[in-house]
Image (spheres, helix red, strand yellow):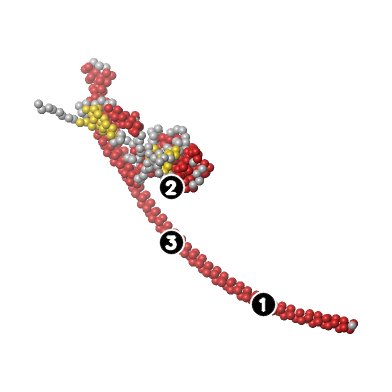
Amino acid sequence: MLNEILLGGGTAIVSGVVGFYISKKLTSANFDVYKQQALAKANVIESEAQSLLERARLKSLEIEQEAQKSFENAKQRAKEDMSQREDALIRQEQSFKRYKQGEEKKLQEETLIIKTTKINLQRNEKSLTALQEQYEKKIDEAVHVIEHSAGMTQEEAKAALLKKVEYKARGDIAHIVRRYENEARKEGEKKANFILAQATSRFAGEFASERLTNIVHLDNDELKGRIIGKEGRNIKALETLLGVDIIIDDTPNAISVSSFNLFRRAIATKTLQVLIEDGRIQPARIEEIFQKVTNEFEAMILAEGEELVAELNVGVMHPDLMRLIGRLRYRASYGQNALAHTLEVAHLAGIMAAEMGGDIKLAKRAGLLHDIGKALTHDHDGNHVDLGAEICRRYNEDEVVINAIYAHHGQQEINSVECGAVCAADALSAARPGARREVLESFLKRVTEIEEIAMSHSGVKQAYAINAGREVRIIVNATLVNDDESILMAREIAKEIEDRVQYPGEIKVNVIRESRAIEFAK
């Protein structure tokens, strides 16, 4: 039994040793296989890495070549652009030299003309002095004769003589005035027509006739009920917030927005359009959309002001002034859009200043700002002249600009060429046919006043204001007024109209003297 146990134990030991040896051999064989597989994979990875590295190197060479090619192309274009700029600069320099030579030649010619005119004036002054001395000598002789013959004192004789001379010389004076007036008119008209022709040929502005209502179109009439809201809640909120009247009537697919304030009316119209597109019409949404549209309009008018200042090239300007310029688009005077009028005045003033030797940029700037106060009249008390002058002083504008603001309404004298150009341009823009509408009552009052002024003069038979009050025709009695006196009458009536009547542009005074011979055959 013991032997069997020992024999079994020995057999088990031998079997375990043999199994361990066999297992070790198998493990060693598998390890070699795995090692060979790993080495093979490593070789494959290394080969792929080499291939990728080679492709990356080729790609980098291609990119480098493309970059070099782009650099060469850019370099060539830069050389060509530089060459073109140099050529343009040379041409501009040559053009400037020719312009300079021409201006120097003109200056020399004008200097020669001035010297010649000065010499002629000196000669005329000497001649006038000699004639005056002779005239005074003759008067003294006449006074001496009258004093001895009539027994009057020297003062009485002098007064009687001067009265008689004045009465007799009235016709001569009128004749001289007529002759020199015709000469001055011809020369003045020639120069003025030249300047105006230059101005109007180089600038032609459009005008806008503004209305008091805007129309908002609806897709269907059901939207009217939503705009009104329950118990009128929505329309009350709209009118209170927007500051306009919203008219909802029987007009199909449309409502009207009414207000005298163009800016407020434009914001209200845009707000309603956005609300209709959005579909959510309620007080909270109305306030939200209104604020958004208001901010957009403020940004838009500032951008428009900046664009106009840059376009006119009038220099640096404060943002508040540029915002007010943009806001002039929503201001009208007698139906004429204030911004369109302002741009016309700025362009025309610049052209006139150039023709008259003034500062073009300053004239344009004064023209652009001459009615700036109109952008403030809806929100501030006072007239647009005082408001405009105050805002321009606040931002340190030139005195010429301030003078133009006052002078274009006659509150100051014109102190510069630029200011005169602005006043003339303002009258041209406002007085041209179709530029402005006028209230009937003020028109009738002006026409009546003009006719009354003409009828108040002695010798006048009839007076008619025609051509929309821009011309008055006066028929005089031919037996009481001669041709030369009619010239003096026309001047006196024109001066009286200037002093007493407010009118845009100018009024032409025509004095007509007609002789009629009447006889009856019996």
Please state which of the two labelled residues, at mark 1 or mark 3, is closer to the viewer. 1
Residue 40 position within the rendered picture, expressed as x and y whole percent measured from the top left = 65, 77
* Kind of residue at disc 1: Gln
Q: Quadrant of the N terminus?
A: bottom right
Indicate which disc, 3 or 2, sits on the residue closer to the N terminus: 3
Residue placed under numbered mark 2 in the picture? 219
Pick the front one: 461 or 393: 461
Q: Quarter of the image holding residue 325?
A: top left
Residue in the image at 49% along x and 47% along y: 279
The tag on residue 80 is 3
Indicate which disc, 1 or 3, sits on the residue closer to the N terminus: 1
The vertical placement of 49 against 102, above or below, is below
Pick the front one: 187 or 74: 74
Alpha-carbon distance for marks 3 and 2? 58 Å
Residue placed under numbered mark 1 in the picture? 37
Pick the front one: 425 or 28: 28
The tag on residue 211 is none
* Kind of residue at disc 2: Asp
Give the residue at the far top of this rendering. Answer: 151
